[in-house]
Image (cartoon, rainbow, N blue to C red):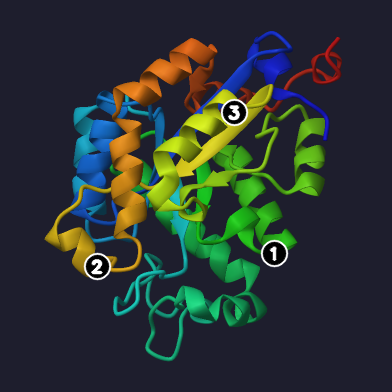
């Protein structure tokens, strides 16, 4: 996969760039508090807002109170919390292929069925509803990414989302090699390496694992999708199987050890803002794409 990010973002070829993005902003109060602290007191530089969630209103108020906090829209069409019922933002009856027998979003355990059934037209309606809800709140997102739908889940979904990103002047989280190459030929920067999802990291060994990843961070643009949460009764009740992932994420992200290691390693922390500037401008000239 060719390198692009360092060239177009104005960094030397040997620079190690890292976006640490807090996914699931707005999912609950424990996520909102942890995300705000991880940015203002820790090493997180970006967040992703789940517009359909009950705590999204609180998250939007936090964003209005902190206008310099970069965030994207965490496009949410699957529910990964057993026992909860999530609904689309689009008007009732307008996205029938997106909802299950009860009229709610499909659970993550039914992902294959969802991908087989859902229409890209319905998803575009819902994605627009979520983006427009954020804009209507007076907020300016930097990028789009997906909740539990890595690279959109299907090529046509990914391509539709990329089109929406360019339409709204936003960057897009993409790691699919074929789509990355297509975007880069248009001069649009993306991650150079596979996305690191914190749910794939053993919470019992997390501090050591994260420190090793930082010390071994490759040249180019890497992104970590982290999921900070403040430990407590609410978090443990809503995520009995995932609370340790979120709590250990939060503890590491606000630790002095994380900040010191990033500084010692000379890692450049970024938000999506510099990528958005290029996406919103339609990409860069071919000579810069090739490194000329």
Which mark lies nearer to you, 3 or 2? 2
- Front residue of 261/123: it is 261
Q: Which mark is residue 6?
A: none
Q: Residue 110 in the image: x percent, y percent?
A: 53, 81
Q: Which residue is mark 1?
A: 154
Position of residue 107 relative to residue 270, above or below, is: below
Can residue 228 be seen from the camera position used here? no
Q: Secondary structure at mark 1?
A: loop
Quadrant where the image shows the N terminus: top right
Q: Is residue 67 left or right of residue 279?
A: left
Quarter occupied by residue 244: bottom left
Inter-mark Cα distance, 3 to 1? 24 Å
User: Which residue is tagged 3?
Assistant: 280
Residue 21 location (% of width, % of height): 44, 37
Taking 239 as reference, is 114 above or below it?
below
| Circle nearer the viewer, 2 or 1 | 2
Q: Where's residue 206, x and y in %?
A: 42, 43
Q: Residue at x 64, y 63 (%)?
A: 153
Mark 1 is surrounded, within 10 Å at the Cα level, by few (under 14), some (14 to 19) or many (20 or more) other residues, namely few
The residue at which mark 2 appears reads as 238
* Residue for point 66% across, 47% down: 163
Residue found at x 71% / y 53%: 159
Q: Within 10 Å of the Cα at label 3, are there few (<14), some (14-19), or many (20+) other Cα atoms? A: some
Q: Secondary structure at mark 3?
A: helix
Which of marks 1 and 2 precedes in the sequence? 1
In the displayed structure, would residue 66 be above or below residue 150? above
Instruction: Give the residue at the far left of this rendering.
Output: 233
Q: Position of residue 50 (x, y in %)?
A: 36, 53
Camera-nearest residue between 230 and 175? 230
SS at mark 2?
A: helix
């Amino acid at each position: 996969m060719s390198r692009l990010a360092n060239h177009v973002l104005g960094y030397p070829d040997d620079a190690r760039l890292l976006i640490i993005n807090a996914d699931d902003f707005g999912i609950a109060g424990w996520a909102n508090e942890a995300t705000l602290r991880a940015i203002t007191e820790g090493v997180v530089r970006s967040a992703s807002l789940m517009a359909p969630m009950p705590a999204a209103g609180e998250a939007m108020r936090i964003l209005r109170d902190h206008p310099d906090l970069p965030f994207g829209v965490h496009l949410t069409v699957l529910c990964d919390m057993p026992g909860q019922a999530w609904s689309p933002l689009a008007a009732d009856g307008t996205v029938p292929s997106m909802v299950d027998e009860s009229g709610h979003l499909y659970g993550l355990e039914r992902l294959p069925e969802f991908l087989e059934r859902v229409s890209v037209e319905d998803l575009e309606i819902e994605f627009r509803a979520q983006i427009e809800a954020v804009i209507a709140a007076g907020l300016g997102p930097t990028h789009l990414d997906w909740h539990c739908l890595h690279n959109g889940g299907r090529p046509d979904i990914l391509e539709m989302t990329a089109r929406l990103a360019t339409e709204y002047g936003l960057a897009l989280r993409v790691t699919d090699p074929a789509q990355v190459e297509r975007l880069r030929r248009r001069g649009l920067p993306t991650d150079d390496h596979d996305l690191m999802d914190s749910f794939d990291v053993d919470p019992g060994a997390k501090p050591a694992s994260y420190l090793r990843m930082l010390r071994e961070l490759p040249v180019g643009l890497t992104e970590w999708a982290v999921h900070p949460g403040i430990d407590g009764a609410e978090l443990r009740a809503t995520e009995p199987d995932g609370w340790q992932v979120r709590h250990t994420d939060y503890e590491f992200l606000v630790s002095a050890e994380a900040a010191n290691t990033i500084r010692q390693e000379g890692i450049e922390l970024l938000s999506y803002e510099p990528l958005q500037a290029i996406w919103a401008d339609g990409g860069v000239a071919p000579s810069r794409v090739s490194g000329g």
